[in-house]
Image (cartoon, coloured by chain):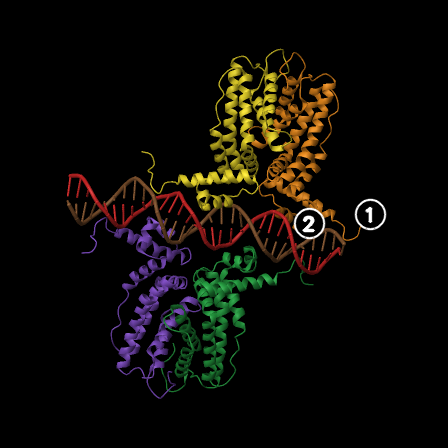
Chain colours: A yellow, B orange, C green, D purple, E red, F brown
Amino acid sequence: MATAKIGRPRSEKSREAIIGAAQALLNEKGGAGLTIEAIARRAGVGKPTIYRWWPTLADLVLEALLRQADETIAVPPRGSLRETLRPFLRQSMKAIADGGGAHLRFLMARAQMDEGFRQRFRDTFAARRRAVLKSVLLRAAERGEIGPGQNLDMLLDLVFGAMWYRLLIGHAAIDEPFADALTETIVGLVQPGEFRGQYI
Amino acid sequence: MATAKIGRPRSEKSREAIIGAAQALLNEKGGAGLTIEAIARRAGVGKPTIYRWWPTLADLVLEALLRQADETIAVPPRGSLRETLRPFLRQSMKAIADGGGAHLRFLMARAQMDEGFRQRFRDTFAARRRAVLKSVLLRAAERGEIGPGQNLDMLLDLVFGAMWYRLLIGHAAIDEPFADALTETIVGLVQPGEFRGQYI
Amino acid sequence: MATAKIGRPRSEKSREAIIGAAQALLNEKGGAGLTIEAIARRAGVGKPTIYRWWPTLADLVLEALLRQADETIAVPPRGSLRETLRPFLRQSMKAIADGGGAHLRFLMARAQMDEGFRQRFRDTFAARRRAVLKSVLLRAAERGEIGPGQNLDMLLDLVFGAMWYRLLIGHAAIDEPFADALTETIVGLVQPGEFRGQYI
Amino acid sequence: MATAKIGRPRSEKSREAIIGAAQALLNEKGGAGLTIEAIARRAGVGKPTIYRWWPTLADLVLEALLRQADETIAVPPRGSLRETLRPFLRQSMKAIADGGGAHLRFLMARAQMDEGFRQRFRDTFAARRRAVLKSVLLRAAERGEIGPGQNLDMLLDLVFGAMWYRLLIGHAAIDEPFADALTETIVGLVQPGEFRGQYI
DNA sequence: AACTAAACGAGACGGTACGTCCAGTCTTTAA
DNA sequence: TTAAAGACTGGACGTACCGTCTCGTTTAGTT
């Protein structure tokens, strides 16, 4: 059969405390000052307990992010591209404004320092987000709302790139007006019509 | 006049050695492992000498980046938007591929950990790059190549965002085909014509 | 010339504080519980400062022992063997009773766990103590107080062995009566006379 | 009567495995590196099983020592003091050379760190060894081979002290020549005759 | 034969200390 | 009088064990 399950089982209480402490510290002090030592102190937990379950502080923060993001997933239903994309972007930006931004900024920074984590971050979080939006675009393309010359992956880079760029550089707000403007820009970009440049 | 210039003069040799060491370490080992201590060792210099001239390791790397980027600035001249944007993007991506990518990734990571540097990074480097591209877009708008409904700042976010996003996530290459595709996408997006959504 | 001496010199204040803290902790809590971490805390010093100057906690304790033993060295002068040996042993045992015992027990324990330190301990401390007593025995032998059949190194093992054995096992006191009895035993053992067994 | 004896009985197999693993590790790697964790791993046993039966790692090693020493006990029979003492010492030193030395060094080190174990070590192992040798000396004294002025306990300290001292410091071998030399020294020391110093 | 209870292996737990790296500051000598 | 060099305090790192705990499993003796 499967592997036998022996030994003391994992303490869910500790797990919760650790993730909770990471959340709290990130929201209070921001990414700098978020250390494994501080989390262990706050959670009333030994450092090895953290290392046992997460290879890296970044992986722990990623799990914390996913935990709180899961509640707000809400796959967008149907309708026109505009009516699907707008709530997707509004919701994404709302999650960022409501605290997720600190997580994302921390994770992106760590991804630049740890190639292993960068790969995990790319393959789990980023790829998942891209997949969600890509399915939206694919349905729009099937409905004929997107011209045949459009490269959907380029569109993903444009949309997520603009959000990440604003988040990381911090030169402009990530709010509902931005979500709406980005929606209109993308909708305007993709609409089929006369030839407007060839994708190479 | 002002303060007399007495005392031991600054050693330009040390300055060069420091920046050179930073360049070398960044290219060899990447962002992780780039520390002030390592730079001081490599440059044969005391740590305080570094702290005296740069407030932060990130500022030092930023200077190193600007130093090597200055040679490749070459403001794009005239012609159509396509003919101006394409070399601009090709050149930008070539600089990234030729080693600048490590600098940029390091700087963006540090900006997420140090709000003070983030501001300097935004106000010097990022703003400068935006200004260059914006002047290109403005000239194109004057020539009527860009429709009146376009928000130029949104275009900047799209272009730089897509580049940064690919650089940071690492899911796709930053190369000439990408530069060309991005050029075509932007050119197609901005061309004036029938109404295609209103910027809010 | 010799090597130039630049840079901040070693802080004698820290050195004193470290050794003092080690002394204090050893006297208060005994060998168990004497850790580098605790010494650093007590001395108000960073751990690396300790590691910079002593390879091992044991080496630090050894220096602390030598520092306080230096004051009580007082090489025994002349006279008969009995008149020289007795004060030597009394003084040695007084030093043990006055606090040196904790140091010695700690050091001997560490020597059993760290072969490198064991060698240093043997070559510096133990060899030095043996040399002092051996010179006493040599002078006595020159004066004819020790029979020709005696192996002086065996005598050293007997004298130091008995002291260490009592100290480590703890079955009997290390005090003045013991010093005097040991003196008489050795003096009786070595006196020349009829043949009493041959050293092999 | 007392508590009924129900439940699973102690596993002798585990006990053997634990003691065997301790023996093996001690012989292979010496005292440093002998940990309960390593023993449990090697023996294929859970840590609590070890803690259930021995209060301390030192107590476990002590039992391992006694188990292998029991085979070589061989109480010395009769004859002169020399003829009794010499095999006793030879045998003791052979046991040390054959592997018991590592056990003894480990135990003596642990006795310095744990006062509770020091007492047990003293009251069981050391006292037993002293009793054996003391009975030898008593019989010799009854036969008149030892002068009336001799303090037998001092003799025990001399003999065991010299052995332990060599074992712990490591400045000289513990071998048959040493056993013989020590025998002759003791025999020469104790022989009755003209007055040779008074024991105080 | 079924029940009971202790000992078993496994391994996670909260902790302590380890020895190292680096940050940023301070103090001295050299230029 | 400033630059340069190196020792400083201090915090966090990731690891090794400690001794305790909680599991599911095994194994005898008791009913």
- Of tags 2 and 1, the one toward the viewer is 1
Q: Position of residue D44 (x, y in %)?
A: 33, 48
The answer to whether residue B10 is above or below residue B87 is: below
Say what secondary structure mark 2 lies in.
Answer: helix
**Disc 2 designates what residue?**
B49
Residue at 46 percent of width and 86 percent of height: C144
The answer to whether residue C189 is above or below residue D48 is: below
Say what secondary structure mark 1 lies in.
Answer: loop
| Residue type marked 2 | Thr
Residue at 20 percent of width and 52 percent of height: D4
The tag earlier along the polypeptide, 2 or 1, is 1
The answer to whether residue B139 is above or below residue D111 is: above
Chain holding disc 1:
B
Q: Position of residue B168 (x, y in %)?
A: 58, 32
Q: Position of residue C160 (x, y in %)?
A: 43, 73
Q: Are marks 2 and 1 in contact (CB under 8 Å)?
A: no
In the rendered view, does A85 fall on the left or right side of C156?
A: right
In the rendered view, does D189 fall on the left or right side of C18?
A: left
- Number of numbered discs on residues: 2
In the rendered view, does E11 fall on the left or right side of C76?
A: left
Residue at 40 percent of width and 39 percent of height: A12
Q: Position of residue D117 (x, y in %)?
A: 36, 62
Q: Nearer the viewer, residue C100 or B180?
A: C100
| Residue type marked 1 | Ala
**Disc 1 designates what residue?**
B2
